[in-house]
Amino acid sequence: MSKSTPPSFEMVVLTTCDTHDEAALIRYGLKLRQIPSDLSVPRASLLPTRTPRPIEVRVPRESLERAQGAIQYIAGAVHGDGVAITPDFRCAICGYDMTGLGSQTICPECGTDLASESAKKMARRRLPPDA
C-alpha cells in the first residue's frame, strides 16, 4: 500500500493497466485531484507467463465515485488529449477495451481513429451529459 494512503482505508480496484507507465500516469492524474491510490498485481498474475501481467490501480472505497468521475479526463491525458475513449478506457464507438494500449488511438476492433474529430463528436453524442 502506498505510504500516502492511511492503512485504515479499504482499497478497491479503479482500473487495470498492462504497463507500469500507464499505471503511473493514472496515479499522477489521481494525485493531482487529491485522490490517494496505490498499485497491486493480482496474485494469480505472479506466475511466470509471456503475457503482460495486469496492474491494478486502487483507490480508497470512499474516493471511488470521485475517481470514476475523474478517470475520463485522466484517460484523455494518458491516451492523448481529446480522444473518443470512455471513462472505463473503452472505445466510445464499439466498446473495445483499450486498457493497456498506451497512447494508441486506432481501435483494434473497429479501426476508428479515436483522435479524429468525427469520432470525438460521435462519442460526445453517446456519452451521458454528466460523464
Image: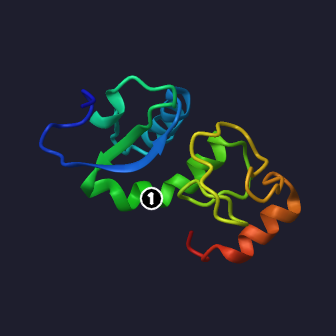
Q: Which residue is at a point 59% across and 54% down the rendered structure image?
A: 97
Instruction: Classify the position of the N terminus by image quarter.
Output: top left
The percent position of residue 115, horizontal first and vertical second, equals: 81, 51
Image quarter of residue 95: bottom right
Tell which residue pokes out farthest to the left in this image. Answer: 8
Vertical arrangement, residue 108 with respect to residue 128, above or below:
above
Residue type at numbered disc 1 = Gln
- In this rendering, position of residue 35 left or right of residue 101: left
Frontmost residue, 39 versus 65? 39
Frontmost residue, 77 versus 17? 17
Q: Which residue is at a point 60% across and 77% down the rendered structure image?
A: 128
Which residue is labeled 1 in the image?
68
Residue neighbourhood size for the residue with mark 1, other residues' Cα within 10 Å, grouped as few (<14), some (14–19), many (≥20): some
Vertical arrangement, residue 21 with respect to residue 94, above or below:
above
Q: Secondary structure at mark 1?
A: helix
Frontmost residue, 67 versus 12? 12
Instruction: Classify the position of the C terminus by image quarter.
Output: bottom right
Q: Which residue is at a point 33% across and 27% down the rendered structure image?
A: 46
- In this rendering, position of residue 59 left or right of residue 83: left
Vertical arrangement, residue 2 with respect to residue 95, above or below:
above
The percent position of residue 21, horizontal first and vertical second, equals: 55, 27
The percent position of residue 75, horizontal first and vertical second, equals: 60, 48
Frontmost residue, 36 versus 79? 79
